[in-house]
Image: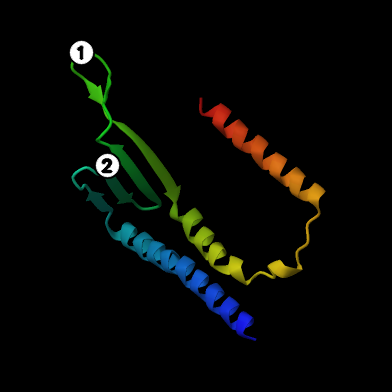
Amino acid sequence: MLHLRKQRVVRTAATVACLLPCLLLIGLWVRAHQSPAYIREHLPGVPSLEFISDRSELHVTHLALDKPMRQLGRGFYQPQYWNFRAPFVFLVPLSAALAFLPWLPWQRLRFRLRTMLIATTTLAVLLGLVVYANR
């Protein structure tokens, strides 16, 4: 009985932890249709983060100010950064689906060793293809 209560508390906490970003994304999506939002955070010694929400996408840019810039030519330098763009139409259902995930009956699922090896091999091949494609 106590084990089931603890399990329910953990499931509820995980659901709340996933639904909160879902609600915040919905609010940001609604606000982005009225006016674009732009948030830039830079602390000394910490790389710069930018969050931009336009009408349909969330852009996250990480600008590595602590790394040396690449030289593009005579006197021109390009900072090193990465950019993540995702549409709200993808992010909101994803976070809602993650909130539902802890309530699935995981105890009833039984996998054989062969199934797990096939799944692990498939995942390794897919990740290898992603790394190869990015080179």
Label 1, on which residue?
A: 74
Mark 2: few/some/many CA within 10 Å (<14, 14-19, 20+): some
Q: Is residue 57 left or right of residue 130?
A: left
Q: Residue 94: x, y in percent?
A: 53, 58
Q: Is residue 6 above or below residue 134?
A: below
- Please state, as top left, top right, bottom left or bottom right, where the N terminus lies in the image: bottom right
Q: How many marks?
A: 2
Q: Is residue 64 above or below residue 3?
A: above
Q: Residue at point 24% right, 49% down?
A: 40
| Residue 8, quarter of the rendered image | bottom right
Q: Is residue 98 left or right of residue 60?
A: right
Q: Residue furthest bottom?
A: 1
- Dot 2 lies on which element? loop
Q: Is residue 29 left or right of residue 3?
A: left
Between circles 1 and 2, the one closer to the viewer is 2
Q: Residue furthest top?
A: 74
Q: Residue at point 28% right, 31% down?
A: 67
Mark number, residue 47? 2
First in sequence: mark 1 vs mark 2: 2
Q: Residue 117: x, y in percent?
A: 75, 45
- Front in this rendered view, residue 66 or 103: 66
Label 2 sits on what residue type? Answer: Pro
- Front in this rendered view, residue 126 or 56: 126
Q: Residue furthest front?
A: 2
Q: Residue 97: x, y in percent?
A: 56, 63
- Dot 1 lies on which element? loop
Q: Which colour style is shown?
A: rainbow
Mark 1: few/some/many CA within 10 Å (<14, 14-19, 20+): few
- Front in this rendered view, residue 118 or 41: 118
Q: Is residue 18 left or right of residue 54?
A: right
Q: Residue at point 51% right, 69% down?
A: 14
